[in-house]
Image (cartoon, helix red, strand yellow):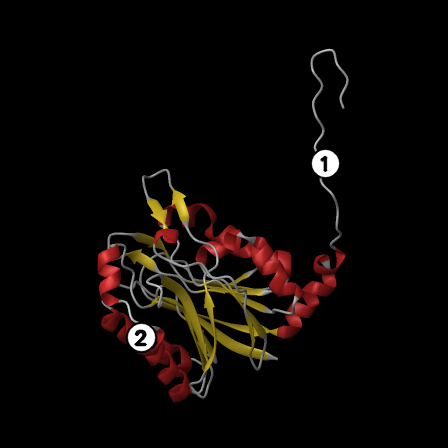
Amino acid sequence: MTATIAALQMCSGTDPVRNVETMRRLVREAAAKGAVYVQTPEMTGALQRDRAGLRAILRMEADDLVVAAAAELAAELGIHVHVGSTAIALADGKVANRGFLFGPDGGQVCTYDKIHMFDVDLDNGESWRESAVYSPGVVARMADLPFARLGFAICYDVRFPELFKIQAQAGAEIISVPAAFTRQTGEAHWETLLRARAIENGVYIIAAAQAGVHEDGRETFGHSMIIDPWGRVLASAGGTGEAIVLAEVDSAAVKAAHDKIPNLRNGRTFTLETAKAPAKGGVAA
């Protein structure tokens, strides 16, 4: 089946109310352009680096503004609305970086908690420790849409190809990668990683991104994009500002890619051995 899907590019600030207003406007615009599935970026509700500031705006899932708005929009427009992720308060005091998928009736199809935490020190002095605040997910997830099977990933997950391979082998035809990539890592790796995951697995990749300079001081890379199973960029946005990225997906293209290069079927198990270099004048073991 074919369908039009959309990735929304945003520059979320620290106020969830304003961010929800932006999300509502962009989702409606995407639906008006024919999108039957719309994805928002990672941390749609707020980008807030200050931990105390984040805690002040956190809500449980049942009371979250982004979650409620996404459900309403899905029902109003009769489409699938995928909140790439938003911060959700957990009962144990931790926080989930959680994505939500809502169906055309407004019902929640599933959630996905980001598995891999962004704990890094970059050359420009940026230091991130997501694991100090967020509780990592432990379940990979897929959902069957009317036009394709959708797999889930969030931002840093893109650097862990085994997550994508497992989903592709289980029949995923589209894998989502909503993100808030830093400018430094985005310039170096964003498009390369996304295209590699598409090519390795013969799937569509849809990646809605945060873009620009945010109220909390961070700068994100943007360049939201949709990539086909052959690794071709079908549509992309720039590095700053809001955007709606649209493309048509076709499950037949996934099958065609798998038929041309059946690497998911051709994998083999093997063992790994390490040879010990001989000492000078000796013989290798």
Report the residue that reaches farthest toward the front. Answer: 92
Where is mark 2, residue-wise? 64
Residue at 55 percent across and 56 percent down: it is 195
Number of labels in the image equals: 2
In this rendered view, identify the residue nearer to me: 80 or 50.
50
Where is mark 1, residue-wise? 273
Q: State the SS at label 1.
A: loop
Q: Disc 1 residue type?
A: Glu
* Res 173 label: none
Q: Earlier in the sequence, mark 2 or mark 1?
A: 2
Contact between marks 2 and 1 (CB within 8 A): the answer is no
Q: Is residue 42 visible?
A: no
Percent from the top left, x then y, of residue 252?
66, 73
10 Å crowding of disc 1: few (<14), some (14-19), many (20+):
few
Q: Quadrant of the C terminus?
A: top right
Q: Disc 2 residue type?
A: Asp
Report the residue that reaches farthest toward the top. Answer: 281
In the figure, residue 89 lies in which quadrant?
Answer: bottom left
Q: Is residue 125 visible?
A: yes
Percent from the top left, x then y, of residue 225?
46, 62
In the figure, residue 241 lies in which quadrant?
Answer: bottom left
Distance, label 2 to label 1, CA atoms, is: 51 Å
Percent from the top left, x then y, of residue 220?
34, 54
Percent from the top left, x then y, of residue 40?
39, 69
Q: Quadrant of the N terminus?
A: bottom right
Q: Is residue 152 above or below residue 122?
A: below
Q: State the SS at label 2.
A: loop
10 Å crowding of disc 2: few (<14), some (14-19), many (20+):
some
In this rendered view, identify the residue nearer to me: 167 or 137.
137
